[in-house]
Image (cartoon, helix red, strand yellow):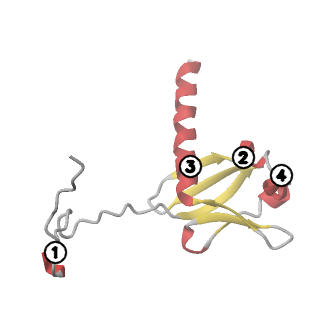
Amino acid sequence: MGQIAKKPTARRLDEVQIRSSPGQNRVKKLPRIVSAMSVIHGVLKIVWNDGYEGVVDLRPTIARGRIFAYLQNPKNFAKVRVSDYGHSIEWINEKGEEIDFGADTLRAKAENQARLNEVASILQY
């Protein structure tokens, strides 16, 4: 009891066993943002590189916390831009500080909000 079973270790690199089959890409590709535009204050329409288009309501997020105070002004919120390579959207405040949201987080929010809207429309009838 309490002993660790000894496994033979590979002595050479070509002896190492690989769990996935050759040519199989185990890394999930992250969504990238192609465009983002303000629809109304606090709400963005975002298009991803796979063609998915979604609307993301950020009003509850930007309403809380001092870090989002810059985005509480509608003129500032409308200055949204897509970061290099589409990994996020961002704003630069008057101090030169960056406020950003990641593409994967926004995609999850867009999909979740779309499902909630779908359920709400079904329950409405």
Residue at left offset 24%, top offset 49%: 2
Rendered image: mark on residue 68: none
Q: Which residue is mark 1?
A: 10
Name the amino acid type tagged 4: Gln
Give the label, 2 or 1, closer to the camera. Answer: 1
Asked whether the beta carbons under mark 2 and mark 1 sit within 8 Å of each other, the answer is: no
Question: Residue 51, percent across and down?
Answer: 46, 57
Q: Tell me if residue 106 comes above or below residue 100 in the rendering.
A: above
Residue at left offset 72%, top offset 46%: 61
Question: Counting other residues with Cα less than 10 Å from the Cα at mark 3, is it few (<14), some (14-19), or many (20 or more)?
Answer: many
Q: Mark 4 to mark 2: distance in Å?
A: 10 Å
Question: Counting other residues with Cα less than 10 Å from the Cα at mark 4, is it few (<14), some (14-19), or many (20 or more)?
Answer: some
Helix, strand or loop for disc 2:
helix
Q: Which residue is mark 4?
A: 72
Q: Mark 3 to mark 4: distance in Å?
A: 21 Å
Q: Which residue is mark 3?
A: 54
Quick one: label 3 or label 4, which is nearer the N terminus? 3
Question: Residue 26, percent across and down?
Answer: 30, 62
Q: Mark 1 to mark 4: distance in Å?
A: 58 Å
Name the amino acid type tagged 2: Thr
Give the label, 1 or 4, closer to the camera. Answer: 1
Question: Counting other residues with Cα less than 10 Å from the Cα at mark 2, is it few (<14), some (14-19), or many (20 or more)?
Answer: few
* 54 left or right, relative to 15: right
Q: Tell me if residue 12 comes above or below residue 116 in the rendering.
A: below
